[in-house]
Image (cartoon, grey):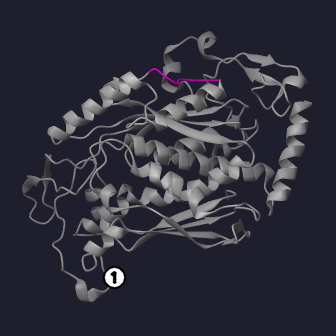
């Protein structure tokens, strides 16, 4: 069992989204403001749909926190769906409202509609699409905000940026070993409408999204998530399900519309010689290890790499370098110019249903990616250093860091 357990509940147009997070130690300072910051970032990005004009997400902490501090019990969070006011009967839990809106019977290619309807024996696709909607990820971002706050107590920082939308590709940020440069790219991305740190490519991406909107089409892309300041030794090589790269890949793949994940140089490694992509090991003297007063310090242990093609993970374990991951998002399957489908009742050829949707959600997906990486790393962190209170976790962590500096 992992150190952190979390679940979400709720439908896209239901009353609210609920989230449950168990395993955060007592003594972590946390507030709704720490969480809402990322919720706002998730709602941004050029190419988002009309839903973002309705919602203004806020996470209400229902349990697990007293007077601004976690108390060791499970956290529960609530995010109200403001759009529920337009769906009170259509999404009511009461049988008296059955049939108040027509059923959805024309499945969308690329969506969960048809497979979900067959699996759960449903003849109204709304019973599938309401939960499979990416609206659910608002709560994942909220839970990830708690994980980020926990990791920040140990100087672990997580960020992201977009490197591709459609055919527009930026070369920035790939396989970096420099934490300072990664943070600079992240800050630049925050001021871009598509969260791309490359100003020229960012403008090209915006124009491409405009083109897709005019054509009733949609766009996917690729984003990068990084974690800086991660100590060596999270994860393990001893069993398949303890390998951290596998767990991170699964976490990112669980995000709606994600179809591919790579760690570090990833797929490109398959086309290179070994000598080109292995990160040679270097050593720095103890007076230049992170935590001293030396301004040139970059790493938490004396061992470091000048390159980071492995993406900070070797043998299923972090190696002290920044963790680098990329995820590919397919174009959103809901199109204003619908594709062909089949009516699930009459079996006749029809145009697929249209639900209000985004043109491009890659910038938002990057923020969701941060949350999933944060939750996975926080769980691995607690597996290694975990205890019931923050003071104990910090004591365990500091003892281990002293050991690795002397290794």
Categorize mark 1 by other alpha carbons within 10 Å: few (<14), some (14-19), many (20+).
few
Q: How far across and how far down the image is residue 235, in percent? A: 70, 42
Q: Is residue 382 magenta?
A: no
Tell me if I can see residue 15 in this picture.
yes
Q: On the rendered structure, is 300 left or right of 131?
A: right
Could you tell me which residue is drawn at 85 percent across and 39 percent down?
401
- Observer-nearest residue: 272 or 335? 335
Q: Would you say the magenta stretch is mainly helix, strand or loop?
A: loop
Q: Is residue 149 left or right of residue 205?
A: right
Comparing 141 with 40, the one in front is 40
Q: Residue at image x 37%, y 28%?
A: 202
Q: Looking at the picture, does residue 346 appear above or below residue 301?
A: below
On screen, residue 118 above or below 311: below
* Secondary element at tag 1: loop
Q: Residue 399: x, y in percent?
A: 90, 44
What is the quadrant of the N terminus in the image?
A: bottom right
Q: Quadrant of residue 390?
A: bottom right
Horizontal and vertical percent for residue 182? 59, 29
- Residue found at x 25% / y 31%: 208
First to last magenta residue range: 171-177
Place of residue 352 in the rendered image (x, y in percent of width and height, measured from the top left): 15, 53
Tell me how many marks there are. 1
User: Is residue 351 or residue 398 the one in the foreground?
Assistant: 398
Q: Which residue is mark 1?
A: 93
Which part of the image, by quadrant, shows the C terminus?
top right
Q: Residue furthest bottom?
A: 96
> Is residue 169 visible from the viewing direction of this image?
no
Residue 280 position (above or below residue 354): above
Q: Which residue is depicted at the point 38% across and 55% down? A: 134
Left or right of 362, for residue 299: right
């Amino acid at each position: 069992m992992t150190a952190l357990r979390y679940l979400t509940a709720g439908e896209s147009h239901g009353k609210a989204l609920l989230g449950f997070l168990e395993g955060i130690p007592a003594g972590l300072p946390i507030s709704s403001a720490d969480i809402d910051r990322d919720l706002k970032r998730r709602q941004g990005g050029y190419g988002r749909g009309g839903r973002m004009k309705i919602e203004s997400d806020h996470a209400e902490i229902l349990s697990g926190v007293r007077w601004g501090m976690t108390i060791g019990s499970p956290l529960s969070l609530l995010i109200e769906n403001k759009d529920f006011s337009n769906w009170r009967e259509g999404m009511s839990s009461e049988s008296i409202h059955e049939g108040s809106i027509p059923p959805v019977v024309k499945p969308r290619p690329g969506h969960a509609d048809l497979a979900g309807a067959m699996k759960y024996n449903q003849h109204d696709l709304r019973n599938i699409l309401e939960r499979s909607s990416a609206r659910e990820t608002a709560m994942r971002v909220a839970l990830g905000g708690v994980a980020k706050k926990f990791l920040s107590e140990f100087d672990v920082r997580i960020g992201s940026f977009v490197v591709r939308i459609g055919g527009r590709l930026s070369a920035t940020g790939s396989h970096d070993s420099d934490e300072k440069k990664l943070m600079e790219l992240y800050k630049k991305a925050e001021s871009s409408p598509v969260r791309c740190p490359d100003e020229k490519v960012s403008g090209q991406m915006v124009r491409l999204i405009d083109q897709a909107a005019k054509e009733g089409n949609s766009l996917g892309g690729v984003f990068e998530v990084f974690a800086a300041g991660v100590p060596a030794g999270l994860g393990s090589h001893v069993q398949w399900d303890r390998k951290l790269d596998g767990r991170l890949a699964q976490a990112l793949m669980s995000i709606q519309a994600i179809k591919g994940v790579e760690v570090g140089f990833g797929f490109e490694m398959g086309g290179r010689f070994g000598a080109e992509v292995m990160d040679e090991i270097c050593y720095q003297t103890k007076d230049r290890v992170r935590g001293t007063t030396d301004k040139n310090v970059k790493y938490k242990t004396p061992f470091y790499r000048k390159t980071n093609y492995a993406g900070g993970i070797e043998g299923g374990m972090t190696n002290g370098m920044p963790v680098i991951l990329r995820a590919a998002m397919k174009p959103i399957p809901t199109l204003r110019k619908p594709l062909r489908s089949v009516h699930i009742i009459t079996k006749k050829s029809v145009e697929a249903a249209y639900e209000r949707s985004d043109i491009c959600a890659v910038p938002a997906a990057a923020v969701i990616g941060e949350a999933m990486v944060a939750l996975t790393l926080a769980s691995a962190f607690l597996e290694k250093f975990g205890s019931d209170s923050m003071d104990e976790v910090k004591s365990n962590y500091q003892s281990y860091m002293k050991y690795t500096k002397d290794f």
